[in-house]
Amino acid sequence: MDDYETIRQLADAIYNPRTSNEDRRLALERIEEIKSQPLIACEIGVKLLATPDEMMVHFGAHFLEHCVRTQWMNFTRPQIESLKNAVFGAFQGLRGAKRFVIEKIITVLVEIVKRDWPQNWEPLLPTVFQLAKTDADYLIR
């Protein structure tokens, strides 16, 4: 199964105004089914963060937000570090992104920070301050 193409089709069914209510409902059910499988949902979310399509990045962040909120305590430290790196990398690559994408990535980052800082993410503040000085001015619009 091509995860990207499957999620793309589901997203199109959800957001296309010409989609019938029944097809939209089925697409939403399929998304919820995927989200109920935490490892698969997180893997798909991380993959989607790296795509050039902003709607798919948003969808990926949505998957990751769900994973962080519902499965955080089940993650191993390497999984957490991988997730942090993926989300922080997406955050650093937000230049020029639409507001809805920026807000969703920041929401996921905040959910991770609430669970992992300061105990396991000491360099967070220096990194954020460095971003604020150099690269994140575009986020404040």
Image (cartoon, rainbow, N blue to C red):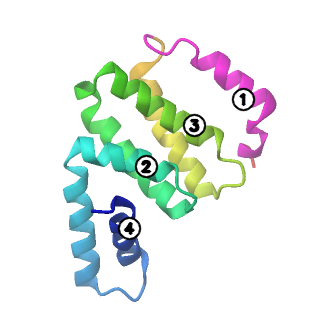
Residue extent of the magenta highlight: 119-139
Q: Residue 49, how many percent across, how many down?
A: 49, 49
The local crowd at label 3, few if under 14, some if 14 to 19, many if 20 or more residues have their Cα within 10 Å, is few
Where residue 47 is drawn, which disc sits there? 2
**In percent of the image, x 35 and y 77: which residue is there?**
13
Q: Which numbered disc flags the more N-terminal residue, 2 or 3?
A: 2
- Residue ID at (39%, 23%): 115
Residue under label 3: 89
Q: CA distance from mark 4 to mark 1?
A: 33 Å
Q: Give the foreground label among 1 and 3.
A: 3
Q: Secondary structure at mark 2?
A: helix
Relative side of 66 to 119, left or right: left
Query: Which callout, 3 or 4, points to the residue nearer the camera?
Result: 4
Counting residues from the start of the chain, the first of labels 4 and 2 encountered is: 4
List x then y, in percent, for residue 136: 73, 37
The answer to whether residue 98 is left or right of residue 36 is right
What distance separates the C-alpha of mark 1 from that of mark 3? 12 Å
